[in-house]
Image: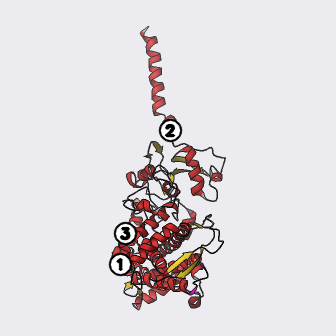
Amino acid sequence: MEYFLLVPLLAFILFLHWWFFSPSNTQKRLLLPPSPTKLPIIGNLHQLGSLPHRSLHKLSKKYGPVMLLHFGSKPVIVASSVNAARDIMKTHDLVWSGRPKSSMTDGLFYGSKDVAFTPYGEYWRQIRSITVLHLLNNKRVQSYRRVREEEISNMIDKIRQQCDSVIDLRDVLSCMTNNIISRVNIGRTYNEGESGIAVKALLEQLLVLTESVIEEGMIRNKKGECNVGEAIDFMGVLLEIQNGKETGYTLQRDSLKAILLDAFVAGTESTYTALEWTMTELLRHPRVLKKLEDEVRELGQGKTEITEDDLGNMQYLKAVIKESLRLHPPNPLLVPRESMEDVKLLDYHIPAKTEVLINAWAIGRDPLLWDDPEEYRPERFLNSDIDFKGLNFELIPFGAGRRGCPGITFAIIINELALARIVHKFNLALPKEEDLDMTECHGLTVRRKLPLLAVATSWFS
């Protein structure tokens, strides 16, 4: 009798062992994020649309702030909440510091040897250190003050020459930004009259230009000419490092080219795109524009020029830029990360080698975080500690953690000084009967589909 009782007991124990320890059943019990129905072969690619940050935000309202999609056969997590962003970029930042393999970035950045897209590891640590400690440290950024002030003055002159007529502000802002980045990177600008290469076409021709620019830089470096005023340009710094100076680390030629490309791509379109969106919102909201004018003109009273020394006192200007970045982050979906091992994201199990997209645009418009999130109201940042430097996950236009953008200070000081000088010198208005189209267009950044047109009239206190 005991024998007959023992057999079913053993069978039950074996069943429990199989259920709990079988790989297939273990996987079934792991809680994966909710997922929309996918199609054969393409997965969920058909649901991305022309503006993925908006399409993914809409999907997240149905499937939650952490959802699983498939781009083809590739599993991709989309995170659209501040808690998920914090978990990825702070709590488990190291695990999520990988980058997914991409043939496009490999082709553009010489095998993804740049800072932004290279895989996490010793090589990344070395070039990240070079970027942070030698190219974008505070002392180096300050050394380019003369370049910024000269090129922003040139922009002001360009606007003045077109006063009382319709001005293409995108053209003005992009030219200024490209000239600053070019001078800082390689010690010179590329203008049509000088080299036959239009500034606007510079990014499109970078792969061709980079090799010749480096050859030119090596010659100039030998002559001691890799300078912009008192400051050595990025090219000069990298050539010294390539020769093993300063760091003791020899920088390979492809790495040098990839880092320069990073600086061009990350520093140009994203900077002027942010400025164009800011000017757009100011023209849409005359009350905000008037309040900004009052602050800048009061602090600049009696001065011929606003300088970088004045910016620290312009709290409303800083709030205006934060509010613009909240509503219009130039890169609304942060650069993709990839989990380097199995990890828990909030309550979900995420297998190793899973890609994640963080929707900074959706977080910036989350009604759980922001009162009246669709309203442009810079006052929300006055008397607030929220900043965009990677410590407050409600506002992450530059990302955060190990893979956050190292050029925040460099970009923001351009935006602040350019904006302050424009409103100090000019009254701005929309052209008569101009319909301010807010349609977005996706390219290197998400910018206005149509260039911003405005009429400037001179003002001076």
The residue located at (44%, 7%) in the rendering is 1
Q: Of the residues shown, which amino acid type is indicated by label 3?
A: Ser
In this figure, which residue is indicated by the disc labeled 3?
Answer: 129
Of the two numbered discs 1 and 3 on the same chain, state the one appearing first in sequence: 3
| Residue range corresponding to the magenta coloring | 161-167
Q: Of the residues shown, which amino acid type is indicated by label 2?
A: Gln
Gap in angstroms between the C-alphas marked 2 and 3 = 39 Å
Q: Nearer the viewer, mark 1 or mark 2?
A: 1
Q: Of the residues shown, which amino acid type is indicated by label 1?
A: Asp
Is 218 part of what is drawn in magenta?
no
Above or below, 57 relative to 203: above
Above or below, 212 relative to 394: below
Q: Nearer the viewer, mark 2 or mark 3?
A: 3
Q: Position of residue 427 (x, y in %)?
A: 52, 78
Above or below, 219 relative to 29: below
Q: Nearer the viewer, residue 411 or 202?
A: 411
Q: Position of residue 41 (x, y in %)?
A: 66, 50
Of the two numbered discs 1 and 2 on the same chain, state the one appearing first in sequence: 2
Indicate the colouring scheme: secondary structure
Gap in angstroms between the C-alphas marked 1 and 2 = 58 Å
The residue located at (34%, 79%) in the rendering is 245
CB-based contact (under 8 Å), mark 1 and mark 3 = no
Q: Nearer the viewer, residue 461 or 73?
A: 461
- Kind of element beneath mark 1: helix
Q: Say few, some or many: other residues with alpha carbon within 10 Å of mark 3 (under 14 / 14 to 19 / 20 or more).
A: some
In this figure, which residue is indicated by the disc labeled 2?
Answer: 27
Residue 309 - label: 1
